[in-house]
Structures are given as C-alpha cells and as structure tokens.
Image (spheres, coloured by chain):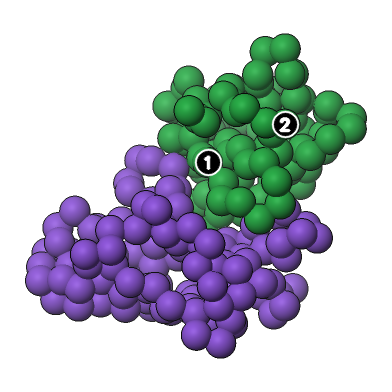
Chain colours: A purple, B green
Amino acid sequence: EAEVAQSPRYKITEKSQAVAFWCDPISGHATLYWYRQILGQGPELLVQFQDESVVDDSQLPKDRFSAERLKGVDSTLKIQPAELGDSAMYLCASSLAGVSYEQYFGPGTRLTVT
Amino acid sequence: AQSVTQPDIHITVSEGASLELRCNYSYGATPYLFWYVQSPGQGLQLLLKYFSGDTLVQGIKGFEAEFKRSQSSFNLRKPSVHWSDAAEYFCAVGDQAGTALIFGKGTTLSVSS
C-alpha cells in the first residue's frame, strides 16, 4: 500500500539554528499539506500545495518558515531560525484533489528545539 | 468561524465495554466529516468519513459514526473496545474537495483491563 514518506522522524536542534523537513506524497497525489501539531492539540494547517503552487499559506509564519514543492512532487518545509515554540510534530498529508477528498498522512517529524 | 469541538479530553473504558466519543462541529457549508486515530509518536490513520448519503457510516477496526445534522454532531462508536484501541482520536471537518481539514483537540482513550 502506498504511503506518505517523511524524514527525518525525529529532529533535535538548538534555538536559532536552521532545520528542514522532507515529504514525499503518494504517487499521483496533486495536493500536499503541511500541518503542525502541538502536543495535546489537533493538527493545524501551515501550507497547502496544488501541484507546485501554493494554495493556502495564510497560517505559515513567513518570517521564519518557508515551503516549496518545486516539481510538484516532493516538498520541503524549512524553519530558520528555529525558536523554542516551534517544538511540535510536523505532519505531511496528500490527497487526490477533485477525485477523493481523503487525506493520507505521513508518520510525521517530531521537532524538539532546545 | 469554522470549528470542531471534542468535549472529552480523556476517556477511560474497560476492555470489552462500549465506546462513544463525541464530536460537534460548526461549519457554514455542507460538512465533510472524518475521524482519525493517532498512536503515540505516529501519524494519523483514517477510521471513517462521511460525505453524503447514509448518516451511519462504517469504518475500519469495527468503528462506526453517525452524522446528525440537527445536532451538528458526528459521534464515534464501537460496541466492544480492545486494549489496542488505546490512542488519541481526532474529529475533523472540511468542505469541498481539496481544502485543508479543521481538527478538534482530540480525545485520549485509555483502556483498562
């Protein structure tokens, strides 16, 4: 069964350092989402892509966060500089927009900022 | 504003007992509703979804949910809980295809023997 891949699974970084997360969606899924999940909360959208275009990045802290999906396949989410409050689980999801509304989630990257 | 409320933060159920997790939503358009389960340190797995039609939907692992438009609810049920069901459960709502989901804060399920 096809799955959404994410790496790394765990990342510990110091405050003010740069960090990057990678996501490879299920093959053929045009829509890709990055969610952030703070401990004890539900996931919240950071950015949504349709192919290589950003559809919604209204909740992305653009002063420190950036996201790209250059060829409309895999995606990278970057934080620079990292802050203590960025400690969270970063989840990537993908879906076949317009055909199936079901979103498939990857295992996530657990970020700890010290 | 669009929102999802899961009133119960933590529920403990005896193994073999029935389970109901509550979910209420506030959404302007016709909602698409989902229940996801998350084991510690893992991603989210879809249990079931409701788009239209029969208001009682069946999912994986023996779960079901009932959509009640008049109560703006989409409660998750299971007739007999197994120890392996211990996890965090999230209700989510969306509308047209492709939009991001709005999640509730989750309910942690503990199963006692």
Counting labels gives 2
Q: Vertically, is B74 above or below A30?
A: above
The amino acid sitting under disc 1 is: Ile
Mark 2 residue crowding within 10 angstroms, few (<14) / some (14–19) / many (20+): few
What type is the residue that disc 2 sits on?
Answer: Thr
Q: Mark 2 points at which residue?
A: B30
Q: How crowded is mark 1: few (under 14 residues within 10 Å), some or many (20 or more)?
A: many
The residue sitting at the bottom extreme is A71
Q: Which residue is drawn at 66% across and 50% down?
A: B46
Question: On the image, numbered disc 1 is attached to which residue?
Answer: B102
> Which of A48/A112 is in front?
A48
The kind of secondary structure element at disc 1 is strand
Q: Which of B71 and B87 is in front in this view?
A: B71
Which residue is drawn at the image coordinates 64% and 61% (left, top)?
A104
Which quadrant of the view contains residue B75? Answer: top right
Mark 2 vs mark 1, CA separation in Å: 14 Å
Q: In this view, does B6 lie above or below A68?
A: above
The C terminus of chain A, quarter of image: bottom left
Q: Earlier in the sequence, mark 2 or mark 1?
A: 2
Place of residue A88 in the rendered image (x, y in percent of width and height, measured from the top left): 31, 56
Frontmost of labels 2 and 1 is 2
